[in-house]
């Protein structure tokens, strides 16, 4: 692959410089590796800003009353949250830990939505105490916990309920969430969703503001959104007639896809917005429902393309007639997606972009699993030890699902812009891995 200028799987600032090296945010990746080491995750600030702006314009121009909240589960830390907040984004949190990071970033907690299918009472109390904007109710048990917390704190809380419309978005089974056979949401078909509406409209401390659904991720098709919006609006109309429910807010969740491979064709923010906004406006008009506030939750779509993972090549194993394994110093500990989802990525040699491809290789990680494969069968210049492999579209659901498997530290994360780099998260040390260990070796008695 000669150069990467303009390729849709790399950050918008990525280019091949005069030395044939990958450059991101005006910085040679070789310089980043020399300064921070590998594995290293590089986030391009301009790409983050560009994609966030694309979503704001695409949805805001078609549906003025739109809120955009970033799904922290894709990847977030205090620095990134602070940056995205300054871009005008709110946040979708799914744990007490994410809420704590959002608080540490000094974000307006009124812009935060708290999701999850099994929130603890302690998490709910922290969320309510923080002044969180919305809690998205997933089940009856959660209502019991929330009411107890609200009674104890002598306060009220605005909520939405997450319903399951029974729509299949045709994505991976592990990330399909809007069907009946899912741990998430209150099914419309079983009557569970109606039972919660009937309960909440009578609550003295809970303010039911609207309905939320999430179909899954990544969703490359547009029609499932239209179908689900019709089902949810039908449900809203029925709840209005039976229980006096007023739909003030609605959320179609997120799930917006990105291009991982050059052959992928993910819909643009404009394409998603055209279908979602159009379906909502037409559906409300037909049912006599006043247009509600809409909240969308892009996570992968904002962070994915902005992030590039850099690894250093070590051992190379040739298996004649079968394949060549190129081992790098990361793997499933920082990107488990290929192992659990069968996800596919592209790769380049960051220090040899101008050279032609001469070998088909499989990029393997360093972890003690045969399934620790990052990129299978990719064409590259024949790699040698010390080369730097760059894997694009690594900004979402890589670091967020990272582990310390084999007691390996998690990578450093840097943010680049206009020729400058800032450390978002330092590399873990071996000492970090043991900070929570309470029982330590006792002095020898001999």
Image (cartoon, grey):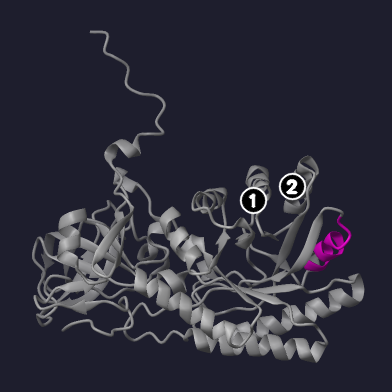
Q: Position of residue 64 (x, y in %)?
A: 64, 82
Residue sitting at x 10%, y 83%? 356
Q: Which residue is mark 1?
A: 119
| Residue 114 sits above or below residue 187 on the image | above
| Residue 268 sits above or below residue 101 on the image | below
Q: Residues within 10 Å of mark 2 (few under 14, many from 20)?
A: some
Quadrant (top left/top right/bottom left/bottom right) for the N terminus: bottom left
Magenta stretch contains residue 218: no
In the rendered structure, which disc, 1 or 2, sits on the residue that comes first in sequence? 1
| Residue 189 sits above or below residue 35 on the image | below
Quadrant (top left/top right/bottom left/bottom right) for the C terminus: top left
Q: Which residue is mark 2?
A: 145
Residue sitting at x 11%, y 80%? 354
Circle 2: element type:
helix
Q: Position of residue 322 (x, y in %)?
A: 17, 72
Q: Position of residue 117 (x, y in %)?
A: 64, 57
Q: Nearer the viewer, residue 116 or 29?
A: 29
- Marks 2 and 1: in contact by CB < 8 Å? yes
Question: Main SS of the magenta segment?
Answer: helix
Residue sitting at x 72%, y 91%? 282
What range of the chain is rendered magenta? 193-203
Report which quarter residue 338 is drawn in: bottom left
Can residue 382 be seen here?
A: yes
């Amino acid at each position: 692959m000669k150069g990467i200028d303009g390729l849709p799987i790399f950050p918008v600032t990525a280019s091949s410089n005069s030395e044939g090296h990958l450059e991101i945010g005006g910085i040679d990746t070789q310089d980043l590796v020399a300064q921070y080491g590998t594995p290293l995750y590089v986030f391009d600030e301009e790409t983050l800003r560009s994609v966030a702006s694309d979503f704001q314009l695409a949805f805001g121009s078609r549906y003025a009353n739109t809120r955009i909240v970033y799904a922290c589960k894709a990847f977030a830390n205090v620095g990134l949250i602070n940056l995205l907040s300054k871009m005008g984004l709110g946040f979708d949190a799914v744990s007490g830990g994410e809420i704590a990071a959002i608080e540490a970033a000094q974000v307006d907690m009124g812009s935060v939505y708290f999701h999850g299918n099994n929130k603890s009472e302690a998490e709910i109390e922290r969320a309510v105490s923080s002044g969180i904007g919305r809690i998205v109710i997933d089940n009856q048990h959660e209502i019991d916990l929330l009411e107890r917390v609200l009674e104890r704190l002598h306060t009220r809380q605005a909520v939405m309920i997450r319903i399951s419309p029974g729509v299949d978005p045709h994505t991976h089974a592990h990330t399909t969430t809007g069907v009946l056979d899912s741990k998430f949401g209150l099914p419309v078909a079983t009557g569970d969703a109606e039972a919660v509406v009937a309960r909440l409209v009578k609550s003295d401390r809970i303010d039911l503001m609207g309905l939320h659904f999430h179909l899954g991720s990544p969703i490359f098709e547009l029609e499932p959104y239209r179908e689900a919006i019709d089902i949810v609006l039908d449900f809203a109309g029925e709840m209005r007639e039976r229980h006096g429910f007023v739909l003030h807010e609605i959320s179609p969740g997120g799930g917006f896809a990105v291009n991982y491979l050059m052959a992928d064709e993910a819909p643009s923010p404009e394409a998603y917005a055209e279908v979602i906004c159009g379906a909502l406006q037409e559906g409300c008009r037909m049912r006599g429902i006043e247009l509600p506030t809409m909240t969308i939750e892009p996570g992968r779509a904002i962070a994915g393309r902005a992030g590039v993972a850099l690894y250093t090549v070590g051992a190379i194993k040739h298996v004649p007639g079968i394949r060549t394994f190129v081992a790098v110093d990361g793997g499933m500990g920082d990107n488990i997606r290929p192992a659990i989802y069968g996800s596919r990525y592209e790769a380049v040699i960051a220090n040899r972009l101008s050279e032609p491809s001469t070998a088909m290789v499989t990029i393997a990680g360093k972890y003690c699993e045969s399934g620790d494969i990052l990129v299978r069968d990719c064409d590259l210049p024949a790699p040698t030890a010390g080369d730097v492999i760059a894997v694009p579209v690594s900004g979402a659901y890589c670091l967020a699902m990272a582990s310390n498997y084999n007691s390996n530290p998690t990578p450093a994360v840097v943010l680049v812009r206009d020729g400058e780099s800032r450390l978002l998260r330092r590399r873990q040390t071996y000492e970090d891995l043991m900070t929570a260990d309470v029982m330590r070796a006792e002095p020898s008695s001999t």
